Image (spheres, rainbow, N blue to C red):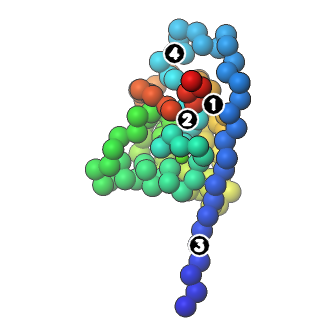
Amino acid sequence: MTTIYLVATKTLSQPEPEYGLYGDETQASGNIVRGNADSSDNIDLSDPIWVLNFLFLGGAEPACLDSADSDDNGRVELTDAVYLLNFLFLGGPAPREPFPACGFDPTLDDSTCDSFEACETT
Ligand SMILES: [Ca+2]
Ligand SMILES: [Ca+2]
């Protein structure tokens, strides 16, 4: 019997904070990496699984819905998990900005972001 392991990890860079971009109008969107739904050190299979667990299995809500909203349409839904899987394993498009480095969500929408530990510098 042959066992096939599928592993995909994309390590995120952690740039120096860009002071001056932290205007009041962007504070609400937080400093995030899109697609890193579980706010870990990287984007990997655990992120779409986190989204699916939240949506369908009663798992914990991501502290930062903006990071889980891979396609930046303002909602966290099945398509965001599919989007990530397509990116990780099928060469699909990368998550919308901010990605792959920490940054502010340029889109005003209903997604919220209470905290995103992976981009906290202190
Ligand atoms: Ca992650
Ligand atoms: Ca979405």
Please, what secondary structure does the residue beneath circle 1 have? loop
Amino acid tagged 4: Gln
Residue contact at pointers 4 and 1, CB within 8 angstroms: no
Q: Residue at x 60, y 68 (%)?
A: 6
The residue where tag 4 is placed is 27
Numbered circle sitting on residue 118: 2
The residue where tag 1 is placed is 102
Q: Is residue 86 above or below residue 93?
A: below
Instruction: Provide residue 89's location: percent of width, then percent of height.
Output: 62, 61
Q: Nearer the viewer, mark 3 or mark 4?
A: 3
Label 3 and label 4: CA atoms lie apart by: 40 Å
| Badge 1 residue CB within 8 Å of ligand 1 | no
Instruction: Provide residue 25's location: percent of width, then percent of height.
Output: 53, 11
Q: Residue at x 53, y 43 (%)?
A: 40
Neighbor class of circle 2 (other Cα within 10 Å; few <14, some 14-19, many 20+) is: some
Amino acid tagged 1: Cys
Q: Nearer the viewer, mark 4 or mark 2?
A: 2
Label 4 and label 1: CA atoms lie apart by: 14 Å
Amino acid tagged 3: Tyr
Neighbor class of circle 4 (other Cα within 10 Å; few <14, some 14-19, many 20+) is: few
